[in-house]
Image (cartoon, rainbow, N blue to C red):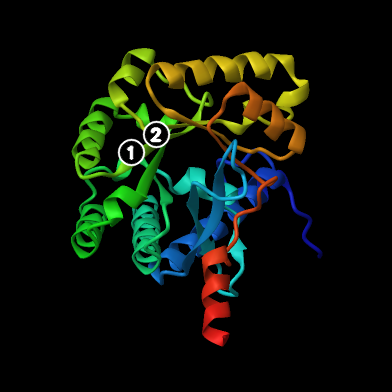
Amino acid sequence: MEHTSTWADIPAGHDNPLSYAVTARDRTVIDMVNQAVKHKQVMLAFQSVVPATRQSKPAFYEGLIRILDETGRIIPACDFIGAIETTETGRVIDCLALEKGINTLSEHPDLRLSINMSARSIGYSRWGRILKRGLAKDSTLAERLILEITESSAMLVPELVVGFMSELQQKGISFALDDFGAGYTSFRYLKDFFFDILKIDGQFIRGIARDADNQILTAALASIAEQFDMLTVAESVEQPEDADFLTHMGIDCLQGYYFGAPTVNPPWLDKGLAQASA
């Protein structure tokens, strides 16, 4: 007799077949990520951050970690980042991103690069060792390295972040507060953080030229940055009219697909290949 699936066949804890399928898929993705990280199947993709008034030459690049599956394809970060953020794998990903960022800076002495990290990695011994080795090997590295911490991450342990930033800023490293406006920063802590760069979350930037509400909100966020002497970066700039509006608003730097998608083949690699073949 042919068996017909019933609700009784779904494992406990699942409301319906769809949720079970989604959970099973998520487990598979997390397993792939864990294996990829274990074998260092990662790379950096680079996206330019340009001065608003001189858009032809980037001020710096953001290095974004990419995790590869066994076939070499990129596993979308949105499929796993929330699940691994609090785990050991999340800390190892921060380590790999820093390691690759430092190597890139060492190989290209004219480059300035930002690397993302979680506040949860503060005090993680492996991460600290990687940074210490990098700083010891290249005396110019500190002034060319920017560490990006998301607003939501910074607010997990604000007192710890303040001390961590103060120590590394004395060595010349800069800090960016990423995705500002997306979280719940307490202004009591904001004045103590002393971030060098404030990156305004893309939800306020997309379509800003035609959105009066986002114009007001972005102007308010920019005024906060100005008060605390922070450079402003508008994230997710995708249209020329938005770039023009932000430039006239006085935003310092712009980042987004209008200036180029993140790429694993940045300009300095193309330049190196051209010189090698000359």
Question: Label 1 is placed on what type of residue?
Answer: Ala
Res. 266 visible in picture:
no
Q: Which of 16 and 23 is in front in this view?
A: 23
Tell me what residue is drawn at x 28 percent, y 51 percent: 142
Numbered tag placed on residue 150 in the rendering:
none
For this view, does 81 lie left or right of residue 202?
left
What residue did someone put label 2 on?
A: 153
Q: Quadrant of the N terminus?
A: bottom right
Tell me what residue is drawn at x 38 percent, y 16 percent: 186
Task: Check the image and report above or below for 262 versus 178.
Answer: below
SS under mark 1: helix
For this view, does 1 lie left or right of residue 158?
right
Tell me what residue is drawn at x 20 percent, y 32 percent: 163
Tell me what residue is drawn at x 31 percent, y 27 percent: 194
Question: Label 2 is placed on what type of residue?
Answer: Ser
The percent position of residue 52, horizontal first and vertical second, equals: 59, 36
SS under mark 2: helix
What residue did someone put label 1 on?
A: 119
Q: Nearer the viewer, residue 66 or 83?
A: 66
Q: Which of 173 and 59 is in front in this view?
A: 59
Marks 1 and 2, Cα distance to the nearest angstrom? 5 Å
The percent position of residue 147, horizontal first and vertical second, equals: 36, 44
Task: Check the image and report above or below for 122 versus 157.
Answer: below
Q: Nearer the viewer, residue 268 or 236?
A: 268
**Mark 2, other Cα within 10 Å: few <14 / some 14–19 / many ≥20:** some
1 and 2 marks in contact (CB < 8 Å): yes
First of labels 1, 2 by sequence position: 1
Quadrant of residue 2 in the image?
A: bottom right
The percent position of residue 155, horizontal first and vertical second, equals: 36, 26
Q: How many marks?
A: 2
Q: Quadrant of the C terminus?
A: bottom right
